[in-house]
Amino acid sequence: MQVIIIEPGFNSWLVTQPPRGFYSQSTLELRNDFYVREYNLRVNNSINYSPDLYVWRIDYDRNVDYGYEVNYLLYNYFLFFEKRYGQKLR
C-alpha cells in the first residue's frame, strides 16, 4: 500500500520534520487512529466544520498493517494540515 499526498507545500514541509524511523510504527498507528477518527467526525459534521477542508472520509483501520511509510506520511499530513489550515485535531 502507498499514500500519495498532493497538497502543495507538503513535501517541502516534510523535510523539516523528524526523519523516518524517529517514531515507531505502533506510535504512528496510535496517533493516526486518533487523527482519522477526529478528521472523519468533522467530515460528517459540515455544519460546524468547513466542507472545503474536510472533503472526504479517510478509510483507515488500525487493525490493518499499512506499513511504516503509509503511517509516517499520514501522520505528518495531519500535522501539516493542522498547521497550514489552523486546525487542531488533537
Image: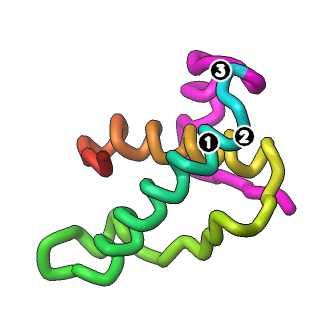
Circle 2 residue: 25
**Residue 4 coordinates in the image, percent (x, y):** 73, 55
Residue 15: mark: 3
**Label 1 with label 3: CB-CB less than 8 Å:** no
The Cα–Cα distance between marks 2 and 3, rounded to whole angstroms, is 19 Å
**Label 2 with label 1: CB-CB less than 8 Å:** yes
The Cα–Cα distance between marks 1 and 3, rounded to whole angstroms, is 17 Å
* Left-right relation of 87 to 35: left
> Is residue 25 depicted above or below 46 in this figure?
above
For the stretch drawn in magenta, the main secondary structure is: loop
The Cα–Cα distance between marks 2 and 1, rounded to whole angstroms, is 5 Å
Which kind of residue does numbered mark 3 sit on? Val
Classify the position of the N terminus by image quarter. bottom right
Which kind of residue does numbered mark 1 sit on? Leu
Circle 1 residue: 28
Q: Nearer the viewer, mark 2 or mark 3?
A: 2
Query: Earlier along the polypeptide chain: callout 2 or callout 3?
Result: 3
Q: Quadrant of residue 35?
A: bottom left
Q: Nearer the viewer, mark 1 or mark 3?
A: 1
Seen as rendered, the residue at the extreme left is 48
